[in-house]
């Protein structure tokens, strides 16, 4: 165990200070910062919170009713004449003003005056403002109900999850977002996994390494080292993600991020699946690295692994329509599709405990088998420079005889 830990620490130190790792580490925070910044810029360009004036020549708003806006509300100010509204606009007190013609009920004419085009939030809310007050003229009870807001309850397919405001909160998507992050992490870490063994073979240090370590200790230690590297990236990304949520909710006032609830069970489930899945992928990639003479030769095999991880995303429509059907259930048990499938299904239904148990146990068994296969493959190909290792040699009887 001591030697295994030493290998893991050495593998971690060797990679964590590389420029490529630092660039990969900062890539996601940079994407988050750019995404939040771009969202702020677009929101500020499209919306304007200044009041909007109106001149009601038709008597439409004798007793105006307002619908409370969910985000970026705009005040509507009534003016007695178009001249006063024009003066307020020129003084910068309003961003625009509307003139409702005296024959509105026959012509439906409303004129908009502005110096710079008003924000989309302003025009959208004024449209709702007019519609509601038109309804109030004939059906005051209905208008009052509309103004008080709806009480929409969104239920999951199995009826076990309720969203009182009718909008999925951040907690529903968080497990799937973590699944995405882990798969992306696997993509970015594939280079470390492939180089973990090939470098020792290319620089001829393998002869020295194997004199003091068994193949299982070496491969197991390297898997733990790569896992530590990936865990470091995930922690940093999580911190920046949390900071982005705080900025989006408090600094930018984005309602979807305000008072977020966390589905701890869903997150724990994804973590329990992610660890053995990551070990399986790491061990298999290292096994591939042991069978080739150069890293480039294994890239196409790695791409196959990555394709398997994205299969549930391509089938998200099918999984969402029937999350408890046979296909989603089978994908929940398979080693490469389990992580994303569970994340997707968790958005729609509560998963049965027996399926969760089978999935976790299956991933653990595959992880153990993958580490064993990596050690066996390494044992066969560790001293074979310039020669490829075939599957027949890996699983042949002589593979266990090579020390």
Image (tube, helix red, strand yellow):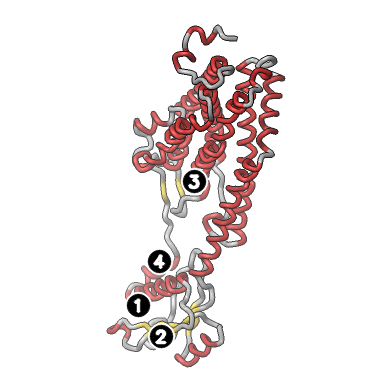
**Nearest to the observer: residue 50 or residue 155:** 50
Q: Distance between the residues labelled 4 and 3?
A: 30 Å
What residue is shown at x 38% (from left), y 41% (from top)?
Answer: 314
Q: Distance between the residues labelled 4 and 2?
A: 25 Å
Image quarter of residue 271 = top right
Which numbered disc flags the more N-terminal residue, 2 or 1? 2
Whole-Å distance between the Cαs marked 1 and 4?
Answer: 14 Å
Instruction: Tell me the quadrant of the picture where the N terminus can be found.
Output: top right
Q: Mark 4 — residue? A: 146
Residue under label 1, please give it. 137
Closer-to-camera residue (205/154): 205
Q: From the image, state whether disc 3 or disc 1 is nearer to you.
A: 3
Coordinates of residue 66 in the picture (x, y in percent): 46, 73
Q: Label 1: state its secondary structure.
A: helix
Indicate which disc, 3 or 1, sits on the residue closer to the N terminus. 1
Q: Which of the two discs, 4 and 3, labels the residue nearer the N terminus? A: 4
Q: Which quadrant of the view contains residue 7?
A: top right
For disc 2, the neighbor class at 10 Å (few under 14, some 14 to 19, many from 20) is many
Q: Residue 173 carries which label?
A: 3
Q: Name the residue under label 2.
A: 99
289 up-or-down from 116: above or below: above
Disc 2, SS: strand
Q: Nearer the viewer, mark 4 or mark 3?
A: 3
Q: Earlier in the sequence, mark 2 or mark 3?
A: 2
């Amino acid at each position: 165990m001591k030697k295994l830990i030493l290998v893991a620490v050495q593998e971690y130190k060797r990679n964590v200070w590389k420029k490529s790792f630092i660039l990969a580490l900062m890539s996601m925070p940079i994407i988050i910062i750019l995404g939040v910044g771009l969202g702020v810029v677009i929101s500020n360009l499209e919306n304007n919170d200044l009041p909007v004036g109106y001149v009601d020549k038709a008597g439409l708003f004798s007793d105006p009713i307002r619908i409370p806006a969910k985000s970026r509300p705009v005040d509507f100010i009534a003016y007695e004449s178009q001249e006063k509204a024009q003066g307020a606009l020129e003084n910068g007190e309003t961003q625009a003003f509307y003139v409702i013609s005296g024959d509105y009920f026959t012509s439906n004419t409303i004129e908009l005056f502005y110096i710079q085009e008003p924000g989309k939030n302003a025009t959208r809310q004024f449209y709702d403002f007019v519609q509601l007050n038109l309804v109030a003229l004939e059906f005051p009870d209905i208008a009052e109900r509309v103004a008080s807001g709806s009480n929409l309850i969104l239920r999951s397919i199995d009826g076990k999850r309720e969203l009182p405001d009718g909008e999925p909160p951040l907690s529903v998507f968080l497990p799937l977002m973590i699944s995405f992050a882990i798969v992306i992490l696997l993509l970015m870490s594939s280079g470390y996994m492939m180089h973990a063994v090939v470098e020792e073979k290319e620089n001829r240090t393998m002869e020295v390494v194997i004199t003091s370590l068994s193949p299982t200790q070496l491969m197991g230690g390297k898997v733990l080292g790569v896992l530590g590297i990936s865990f470091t990236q995930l922690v940093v990304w999580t911190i920046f993600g949390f900071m982005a949520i705080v900025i989006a909710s408090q600094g930018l006032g984005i309602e979807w991020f305000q008072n977020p609830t966390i589905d701890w069970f869903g997150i724990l489930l994804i973590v329990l699946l992610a660890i053995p899945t990551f070990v399986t992928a790491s061990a298999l990639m290292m096994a591939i690295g042991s069978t080739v003479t150069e890293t480039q030769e294994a890239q196409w095999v790695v791409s196959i692994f990555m394709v398997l991880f994205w299969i549930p995303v391509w089938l998200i429509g099918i999984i969402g329509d029937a999350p408890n059907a046979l296909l989603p259930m089978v994908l929940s048990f398979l080693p490469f599709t389990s992580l994303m499938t569970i994340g997707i299904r968790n958005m729609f239904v509560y998963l049965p405990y027996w399926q969760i148990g089978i999935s976790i146990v299956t991933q653990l068994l595959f992880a153990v088998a993958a580490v064993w296969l990596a050690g066996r493959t390494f044992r066969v190909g560790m001293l074979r420079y310039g020669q490829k290792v075939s599957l027949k040699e890996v699983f042949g009887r002589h593979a266990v005889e090579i020390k």
